[in-house]
Amino acid sequence: MKKITFLFILSQIVITLDVIAQNDSIAPLSTDRPTYSIAPNVVPKRTFQVETGFLFEKESTDLDDIDNLYLGMTLLRYGLFQNFEIRLEGTYRQMVIQPNDESPDSTISGLGAVKVGLKFNITEEKGIVPNLGFVADITLRHIGKDGFHPTYSYSAARFVAANTLSKNFSLGYNLGFAYNGENADGFFIWSVVLNYTMFNSISLFAETYGTFDNNNLPHNDFDAGIVWQIRHNMQVDITAGTSFSSSVSFVNAGFSWRLPR
C-alpha cells in the first residue's frame, strides 16, 4: 500500500511539472550551453537551472597526444532578482597523456577548476539596440585536483549581446577580458555565433571564437551543432569543433533543465 501511495504521489508531481513546463506564460528556456558564446538572457526570478554534459577533447603535439575528458561539466544558475542571476560551475576531469616515444602513458583525474559568477541583463532588444547583458566570474585557486586548478584565482568579464536578424536567424556576440591564473598577463576574449531555427524546437548554430593579446598570436576556434528543446523547460544538444590555431578537436553533448516556479 505504501508503494502504491508513493507511486501515485510521484506521478502527480511529474504530471504537475509537465503541465508547468508546457505553460506558455513561463519564459522560454535560454541556456549558455553548448556554445562558447554566452546569451544575454538570465533565468527568471526564483528559478533554478541546471546545464550539464560531457566534453571529449583531443590534442596532438610533436611530443605527445593528450585526451581530455570532462564529465559532469555543470553550470548551476539561479535567478536572484528579475534581471540578475548567480552562477556556479565545475566539472570532473580526466587527462590521459600518451607520449610519442616509448614512455608509458600517464593519467590524471579529479575535480576540475570551479567558477563562481554573476550575470545581469542590461537591456532588451529594441530595433538595432541589441539584447545586452554582462557576465563576470572568478575561477578559484586551490579547489580541484593539482594540475587542474590555477595557481592564482583569476577573473573574466564580458559583455554579451544578441540581435534578431529574421524569423529564423539570430546573431550572438561576446567581447571581454580575462586572466590566465598563472601570471599578471591578461587577454581579450571574443565570440560570434549564428543561430538558425529550423522548427519551433530544433535549431542549428555555427560559431567562431578565440583570444588575443599584444604579445602572442591569436588563438581561434570553430564549432557547430544542434539544439533540441524537447520540452518548454528541457533541452538536449550536441556539438563538434576544432581549433584553427592548434591540433585540437572536440565533441560535446549535454542536457539542460530549468526547475519551474
Image (cartoon, rainbow, N blue to C red):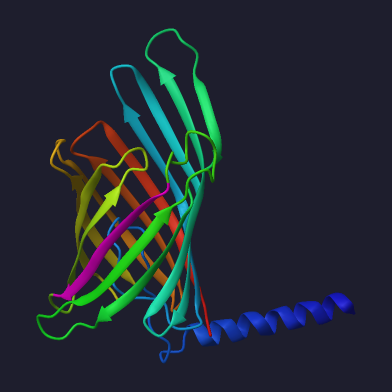
* Residue 58 at x, y percent in the picture: 36, 33
In this view, the residue in front, 201 or 49, is 49
Determine the main secondary structure of the stretch shown in magenta. strand
Which residue appears farthest toward the right when viewing the image?
1
Please identify the quarter of the rendering in which residue 4 is found: bottom right
* Residue 48 at x, y percent in the picture: 51, 74
Which residue appears farthest toward the left when viewing the image?
128
Which residue appears farthest toward the top when viewing the image?
102
Q: Which residue is drawn at 24% across and 67% down?
A: 160
Q: Is residue 49 left or right of residue 241?
A: right
* Residue 165 at x, y percent in the picture: 12, 75
Residue 212 drawn above or below residue 196: above
Residue 124 drawn above or below residue 146: below
Q: Is residue 162 magenta?
A: yes
Q: Residue at x 38, y 80 (%)?
A: 28
Span colored in magenta: 153-164
* Residue 73 appears in the rendering: no
Q: Is residue 97 left or right of residue 245?
A: right
Q: Is residue 133 magenta?
A: no
Please identify the quarter of the rendering in which residue 220 is found: top left
